[in-house]
Amino acid sequence: MTGPTAFVDGVDFVSVCTSDLAAAMDFYGNVLGLPCSSVWQRGGEDPVGAEYETGSLTLALLASARLGLDVRPNNHPIALRVDDVERVRAELEARGVAFKADTLDSGVCHQAFFEDPDGNALALHHRYAPRSS
């Protein structure tokens, strides 16, 4: 079966709304330990966005209201790939992160759900079973 030609060959970034860009930058940079690759401004103003690298996807934090966007946290988690969910969870709990529930074992992966300071849903994720075809 053939279909239309694909125009999209990847995802460059996912936007994450913030009401307090400085607090979000502290959380993603210092609590989660993600490297910041870019901070952007308009004119000589304070920053309106910052990008943090996960290794496979850029998280673009946006000062939403300053960009004319509603501040609406995402309630569906961005899954952050880790080697050991329990080890990383314990480290993040020591840094003040509150998790929503016990770690979930789906039968193919472990997941632990939490939120950033704006209420955007995040999850630690580790797939331990191969994908079925």
Image (spheres, grey):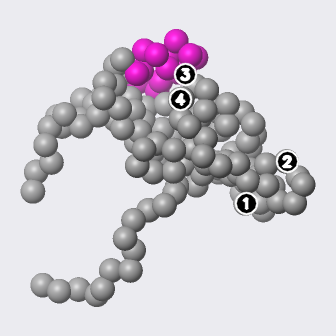
**Separation (CA) of disc 1 from disc 2:** 17 Å
Query: Disc 3 to disc 2, how far (Cα)?
Result: 27 Å
Q: Give the range drawn in magenta.
A: 88-101
Q: Check if residue 97 falls in the magenta segment.
A: yes
Residue that carries the numbered disc 2 in the rendered image: 46
Q: Residue at x 12, y 84 (%)?
A: 1
Does the magenta segment cover residue 45? no
Seen in the picture, residue 126 relative to 54 is either above or below; the reply is above
Asked whether residue 106 appears in the rendered view, the answer is no
Give the CA distance from mark 1 to mark 4.
25 Å
The residue that disc 4 covers is 32
Residue picked out by circle 1: 69
Q: Where is residue 51 in the image (x, y as percent from the top left)?
A: 61, 48
Residue at which label 3 appears: 97
Specify the farthest residue to the left. 133
**Which residue is farthest right?**
44
